[in-house]
Amino acid sequence: MKASDVKKGNVVEHDGTVYQVRDIERSSPSARGGNVTFRFTLYSIPGGRKFDLSLRADDELREMDLVRRAANFSYMDDGAFVFMDAEDYTQYLLSPELVGDNAGYIVEGIEGYYVQVIDEAPVGLQVPSSVILTVVDTAPEMKGSSATKRNKPAKLNTGIEVQVPEYISNDEKVWVNTLTGEFAGRA
């Protein structure tokens, strides 16, 4: 595929690494006969490392076929996360490196996980925008201090820590925004 045909969101291969296109900047030279150049902001799959690439309009990039498969978390296997495809029950084994910071948002019984697959191999995980987690350890509410809204740290059942309002106690279920990592309300 020519560089001029690439759109935002496309998945391409460059120097043996797979990237997703996040931004495209087109620059036309003012002199006649100059070549149009495209500046791509790419993020690697997996890993999410940023990479800037400049190409002329007729340079070639190989388009990759990235498939998003709806999947449910099944269990842990020697530190790896096992997801089962919601349609054909294929099992995907995702390493902790592949899952990255999303590991704290993986719990059983929640829909909205998507395993990103290229050539039948899992390369990434997309988590729902918010998940329900259980508070396992937080300080008790201080009586008489309700005049001001204060937050306190709370450890959740997946091991992550978020700031929650003072009125939240142990064993309560809370919504957590997976994009910001912040408390989003009681569940």
Image (cartoon, rainbow, N blue to C red):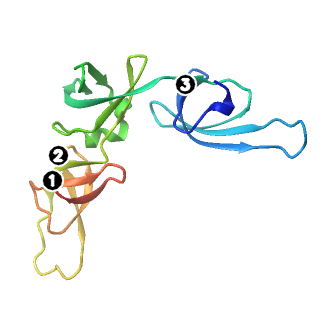
Amino acid type, residue under disc 2 in the picture? Asn
Amino acid type, residue under disc 1 in the picture? Val
Residue pictured at 25% horizontal, 18% vertical: 90
Q: Secondary structure at mark 3?
A: strand
Do the CB atoms of the residues marked 1 and 3 lie less than 8 Å apart?
no
N-terminal of the pair, mark 3 or mark 2, is 3
Of the 4 image quadrants, the one containing the N terminus is top right
Q: Is residue 152 above or below residue 173?
A: below
Kindly give the residue lying farthest to the front in the view shown: 5
N-terminal of the pair, mark 1 or mark 3, is 3
Q: Position of residue 102 (x, y in %)?
A: 33, 40
Residue pictured at 17% horizontal, 36% vertical: 108
Q: In terms of depth relative to the viewer, which is nearer, 175 or 136?
A: 175
Residue pictured at 18% horizontal, 48% vertical: 133
Judge the density around disc 2: few (<14), some (14-19), many (≥20) Cα neighbours within 10 Å: some
Disc 1 target residue = 135
* Marking on residue 157: 2
Q: In terms of depth relative to the viewer, which is nearer, 111 or 53?
A: 111
Residue at mark 1 to residue at mark 3: CA–CA distance: 40 Å
Disc 3 target residue = 17
* Marking on residue 167: none
Residue at mark 3 to residue at mark 2: CA–CA distance: 35 Å
Q: Position of residue 187 (x, y in %)?
A: 15, 55
Do the CB atoms of the residues marked 2 and 1 lie less than 8 Å apart?
yes
Residue pictured at 79% horizontal, 43% vertical: 28
